[in-house]
Image: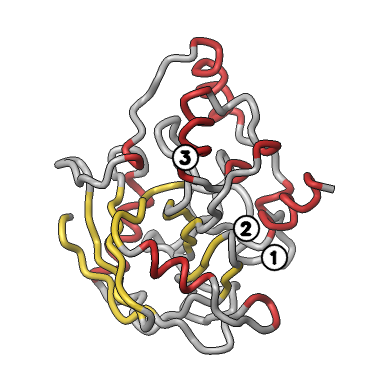
Amino acid sequence: MKIALLLLLAAVLAACSSGEETAGEKAEPKEAQTASDTASETQEEVELPQLSNEVAENEALVEMKTSMGSMKIKLFPEYAPKTVENFLTHAEEGYYEGVTFHRVIKDFMIQGGDPTGTGGGGESIYGESFEDEFSENLYNFKGALSMANAGPGTNGSQFFIVQAPVADPNAFNEIHTDQIVKAYEKLGGTPWLDGKHTVFGQVIEGMDIVDAMAAVETAEADKPVEDIVIESIEVLQP
């Protein structure tokens, strides 16, 4: 029952479900398993930049202003270069201005980035869907900024921010070392999405705004009754 619930929640992050496999139905890519298996066996600690609110020289910083308030998010181009470039370019070109958070689920996530507001639209800057960028340094902790998709290699413009306050202990697997489990126990998050959705940022200010967004009244398809609109995304540190 627990596993079925986790798969159902993962499936709602699919940016498009028509004829495509949802995130909750695909095994973790082999490349991610190989790197993470090695980490599990050696139990070597890795750098986890999401645990710090400081913005390093090799990180980017944006401020997202919404109709419910603002948040600052740091991005990780060292670990997810194509994904960060896609997001920053869209931000600089105003692609996300006026776009809504079209799906919110309390204690799970808030999803946006689709100009159609339906969950089935949005394009990347590359003219086509692009590949996932998984890293042993980035995880779907609470506050993580990750890409929504319709299966492996289907990234476009949609993203979500993890809002789950508690990580389900039954969701950990071989890719989660003791270090990662402890971080999840401290921060919360959605470990079952690791290796399925590219993590490329972390909210460092305004998590209370994210929590407020996740708590709004919703209608069919988890769409907020009153629109939550992205007014602008300003790049503070490219």
Q: Secondary structure at mark 1?
A: loop
Judged by depth in the image, the label closer to the viewer, 3 or 1, is 3
Q: CA distance from mark 2 to mark 3?
A: 30 Å
Q: Earlier in the sequence, mark 2 or mark 3?
A: 2
Q: CA distance from mark 3 to mark 1?
A: 33 Å
Judge left or right: residue 3 versus residue 107: right
Q: Secondary structure at mark 2?
A: loop
Decide which of 124, 185 is in the foreground and name it: 185
Crowding at dot 1, Cα within 10 Å, few <14 / some 14-19 / many 20+, comes out as some
Quadrant in which residue 105 is drawn? bottom right
Asked whether disc 1 touches disc 2, contact meaning CB atoms under 8 Å apart, the reply is yes
Decide which of 3, 197 is in the foreground and name it: 3
Judged by depth in the image, the label closer to the viewer, 2 or 3, is 3
Q: Earlier in the sequence, mark 3 or mark 1?
A: 1
Q: Secondary structure at mark 3?
A: helix
Q: CA distance from mark 1 to mark 2?
A: 6 Å
Judge left or right: residue 28 versus residue 46: right
Numbered-mark total = 3
- According to the picture, the residue beneath numbered tag 1 turns out to be 17
Q: Earlier in the sequence, mark 1 or mark 2?
A: 1
- According to the picture, the residue beneath numbered tag 3 turns out to be 186
Decide which of 85, 72 is in the foreground and name it: 72
**Is 62 above or below relative to 79?**
below
Quadrant in which residue 137 is drawn? top left
Crowding at dot 3, Cα within 10 Å, few <14 / some 14-19 / many 20+, comes out as some
- According to the picture, the residue beneath numbered tag 2 turns out to be 150
Task: Pinpoint residue 92: horizontal percent, then vertical percent.
Answer: 23, 69
Identify the residue shown where x is 69% and y is 65%. 17
Q: Amino acid at mark 1?
A: Ser
Task: Pinpoint residue 101: horizontal percent, then vertical percent.
Answer: 49, 75
**Is 42 above or below relative to 129?**
above
Farthest-out residue, top: 42
